[in-house]
Image (cartoon, rainbow, N blue to C red):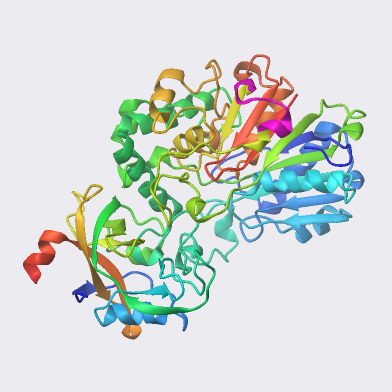
Amino acid sequence: MSRLRQVGAHRGPAPVVHPETEPFWRGLAEGRLRLQRCTPCGTVRFPLGPVCWRCGSFDHEWTDVATAGTVSAAVTVRRATGDPLWAGEVPLVSAQIDMDSAGVRLPGRILCDPDTPPPHGTPVDAAYLAAADGYGVLCFVLRESSQEGS
Amino acid sequence: MRLGGTDVCVVGVGTSEQFGFDLGRSPMRLQAEAFTAALADCGLDRADVDGFATAHGSPTGVDYEEFTAVMGLDCRYVDQAWAHGRWSTGLVAHASLAIMAGLADVVAIANTVTNGRGYARHLGGLGGHGTVEGLRDTGGGHGEWSVHGVDTPGAATSLVAQRYMERYGAASEDLARIGIGFRENARLNPMAILRDKPLTQESYLREPVISGPFRRCDYSLANDGATCLVLAAADRAADLRTHGVRVAGAQSIRSNRDSYVLFSRPGLGVGFADETPLRPEHHPVYEMAGVGRDDVDGLYVYDSFSSNVWMTLERFGFCGEGEAPGWIASHGLGVGAALPVNTNGGLLSEGHFGGYNHLVEMVRQLRGECGPRQIAGAEVLQWTTPWGDSLIFTR
C-alpha cells in the first residue's frame, strides 16, 4: 500500500480519539490509511465502530487500504460559521471521497484552490495533516499534484 | 392513527406574542406565552393539562420539569426529546398514543427556540461550536465532520446540495426559487419574521456564498420564539370551542445507513450510503389517514435548508428523481399553486421553530383562519421531512 504524504498541519478542532479508534488516527500520522475489516465477512467499514454493519460480528482487524479515490462531492466553505478555529482557514475545500477499492466513502478536506473545488469524479489521493498527540487527520490532494510530489 | 377506538385532535394552538431575532424575553417567558395562548385558544385551563412534551430543552429552550414547576402544572405524562428540530412528528405521534392509551387526557407540546444573538446570549452554556455531534466517531447527523471544516448543519448540507446539483444538473436559479417562493408566502403571514423583506432572483444571486452552492437565503433563520399545540381525544375535542383538527396519520423518522445524513434522501449517495436510483418507498401515513397523496391540499416541509424541499418532494413521490427543481419552476410554491408548500413562509422566512410552527399553521389552515393565505377548501394537509417522517392532519 502506498504511504500517505504529510501535506501540512491540522489547525481545526482536535479529533476525539479513544482507545477503540486510536489505530485510525495513529496510523494516519504514520502515513497509513487503516480501517477496520470484518474478520468473518471481509467488509471494510466506515464510520469506525466496534461491530460490522453487514454481518454483526465484533471480530475485526485493522487493515491498510488503497489511498486512491474519486470526489463524490466537494464544496468550498467560505465562511466559518461554526468553530472560530476555522476562521483563519477559510476558504477551504471539504469533500466526500469514494475510495476506489475499499468500497467506503470518506470525509476530508481537499488541499486545492478554493476557487475551483473539483467536480464529482475527480481523482484524488489520500494524504494527512499532522495533529497533536501523535495523531493525523485525513485529507486529500488532487491526483496530479500528488504525482508531482512523489 | 387510532388505538382502542380513540382518535386524537389538535384542539388548541398558540405562539409567543412575537417571533423575532431578539425579543428580549427569556425562553420560559416565550414558552409561557405560547402555552397560555394555546389554552385560551381552546378554552381549557391549566388544570386540564395532565401531559407535557418538548424537544428543545435548556439552555436555549425550556426543560420539561422547569416548565411544569414554573407553570404550576401537575402532569402524569411527560416526554422530552433531544434539542434538535427533528422530533415534531415524534412528539405529536407519541402524545397521541399516550392519549389513546390512557396515559394522559390533554397533552401540551411546547417548544422554544432562542439564538446566540437573541436572548440566549444572556444564558451562557451555549458550549461548543456548531453541533458537537460533528466530533462523534460517526460524524454529525446532518453530515458534519468538525475536524474537516464542515462543522455546521449548513456546511454539511451544502455537500448534499452540491451532489444533487451535479448529479441532476440543477442551478443556483433553481435553489433561489425555493427561498423566493417561501418569502412570497411569508408576505401574507403577519408573524413571519421576514414578511417585509422581498427576495428576487437578482437579490438572491447578489448574496455572498457561504458554503458550496448555499447563500444566506438558503439557510433557515436563527431566532427567538415559542409554539404550543394542545392535543386531546376527539370526544373531548367535541366539547371545546375550537374545531378539533384530527391527527389522522403518522409515520416515524426512517433510520438506517441510507438515511444517516438527515437533509439528504435515500439513494443520493451521501454519508455512508450507496449511490443508487431513487427507489419508491411505502409511506403508510396515507393509508393510516385514509387518503391518497393526490388528496393532499397543502404540503409542509422541514426547510432548515432550501435543498430539503427537493429531497422531500422526491422522497414522497410528488415528482420523480431529479425532477424537483423543474416541478418547483412549473408548479410554484404559493397559496394559489396546485399544491401550496409552507404557506407560513417556512423555516426560511417565518422562522425556525423546529417545524412546530408549520404544525400550528396546518391547524389554522384546516380551521380556515388564514385570511389572505388561506388554502381554499383545505381538508388534508401533510407534514414531511427529508428523513422520511410525516404527519397528516385532516379537518
> Farthest residue toward the left?
A148
Q: Residue at x 86, y 43 (%)?
A: B100
Q: Is B316 inside the magenta-drawn segment?
A: no
Is the C terminus of chain B in the top left, top right, bottom left or bottom right quadrant?
top right
Horizontal relation, residue B98 to residue B315: left or right: right
Where does residue B269 sit, x and y in percent of width and height? Answer: 39, 49
Horizontal relation, residue B327 to residue A124: left or right: right
Is the N terminus of chain B in the top left, top right, bottom left or bottom right quadrant?
top right
User: Quadrant of the rendered structure where residue B293 is?
Assistant: top right
Query: Would you say residue B183 is visible in this rendering?
Result: yes
User: Quadrant of the rendered structure where residue B174 is?
Assistant: top left
State the extent of the magenta-drawn residues as a range: B286-295
Where does residue B129 sit, x and y in percent of width and height? Answer: 46, 63
Q: Residue at x 36, y 61 (%)?
A: A104
Report the magenta stretch's main SS: helix
Q: Is residue B179 above or below residue B275?
A: above
> Depth check: B344 or B323 in front?
B323
